[in-house]
Amino acid sequence: MADAFYIGMDLCSDFTQLSYYNDIKREPESVSQLNNKETYLMPNILFHSTETGHWYVGGEASEARFNEEGIIIDGIFENLESNDTVSVEGEDYTYPDLFVKMVKLHIDSFLYRYEDATIRKLVISVPEYNSRIYQLLSGLYKLMDVPEEAVEITSHLDSGLFYIFNQEQGLWINSVALYDYNADGLNYYRIDISRNRSPKLVTVTHEDYSSQMSLSQYGNDTYQMDVDFAKIADYEMKKAYISSVYLTGVGFTNKWMKKSTNVLCQGRRVFVGQNIYTKGACYRAVGGEYKAFYDQFFVETKENVLFDVGLSLDDEKDTFVPIVNGGKQWYNIRGKIFVILDDTDTITLVYRSRHTDEEKREVVKIHGIPKRPNKTTKLSLEVEFENPTDGAVIIRDLGFGKLFPTTNKIYRKEFSITWQS
């Protein structure tokens, strides 16, 4: 019987990491390079062998370039917006083409290790939302020959939360600190948990320290880097009671922390690892019990929608019918419903806060539809978001079968919803 894997992928500009869910250990397990069992960071480079016609990716590409004649391709992320092409044996590839090929080969290189292995669910974690990358990855399911819902794109922040909340509860009994120190600099996230309200609330505070701490500014001066990080850590640790600290990013790979370690370890547990995001994405892929904190807590982050969008049936009970539910990243929210108008040419849109009783309403008049008998006008309503607060409800006239053909009219009702804090 072929293996079907839950896979988490951490896709960054320089490196990719993969993990898969180990059913026996009941936890994600990082995937090492095939030719180096001690390394989990797979470089984002491609190599095409002109001797065999074979494409290599990651560590295998690094090795093959020294053993076979061919062409090495890097800088794929940096050139995604470029109109340049790369010629490989008479065929021209755009950088978006190469990007998708690279991502697929990273996944294939893992699946090839198992006979007839397939994807059950793949969650790809990127540092933050990027419309171009999201667009390219959204079509990956076709190349992987899996259902559309089998591939999902998320962010480092969301993956980090999935990882943290799937550790033992004692580690997040109070606030949690996450430091991400990569090539772009240092970023700090504090995850605060409020249990004395309903629903229980998780909020994330973000501080960007990249202008104060970046790898390029220190060179080999790790002493000063340690001093500067200790000051930042001391300042942030005094703001809240922190149960645990997670350190991730290439900046934490070398053993330079001495003074800062003493600051971080005062009454709390500290973990250093480069696989937080890939394992968090893997937990998300498995779902089920591993998304339980999303059922228990309302998660409020800079990328999550904080309200539901739906309509009122305008009946005696003022029944609310959701089109989409908030509480997720704006770019991953989708929903569609159908309604049949009953002696009316209006609908009442409702925007309902996820963690208060507050509502905002709009009555929308459907213009331009020919006069039809009662209950013979069918509409579809969809919601699309541009960011966590702004979007539009798309209303389409579907008519009512052959008797009352559609007018093909489309109405777009834009909204911008914010709540008083």
Image: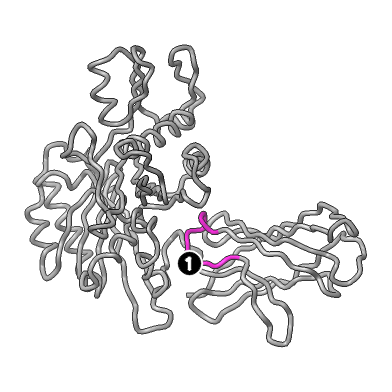
Left or right: 36, with 195 as reference point: left
Note whether 141 is above or below 298 in the view shown: above
Q: Position of residue 366 (x, y in %)?
A: 81, 64
Note whether 250 is above or below 35 in the view shown: below
Left or right: 82, with 397 as reference point: left
Quadrant of res 267: bottom left
- Magenta range: 324-333
Q: Which residue is mark 1?
A: 327
Left or right: 332, with 399 as reference point: left
Q: Nearer the viewer, residue 126 or 102?
A: 102
Q: Is residue 112 magenta?
A: no
Q: Position of residue 218 (x, y in %)?
A: 17, 40
Q: Position of residue 182 (x, y in %)?
A: 26, 45
At 52% from the left and 60% from the top, the residue drawn is: 388
Note whether 243 is above or below 250 in the view shown: below
Numbered label tally: 1
Q: Nearer the viewer, residue 369 or 56?
A: 56
Left or right: 177, with 353 as reference point: left
Quadrant of res 105: top left
**At label 1, which amino acid type do we have?**
Gly
Q: Position of residue 148 (x, y in %)?
A: 53, 48
Q: Main secondary structure of the magenta part?
A: loop
At 8% from the left and 61% from the top, the residue drawn is: 262
Residues packed near mark 1 inside 10 Å, few (<14), some (14 to 19) or many (20 plus): many
Residue extending farthest to the front is 1
Q: Is residue 325 magenta?
A: yes
Residue extending farthest to the bottom is 316
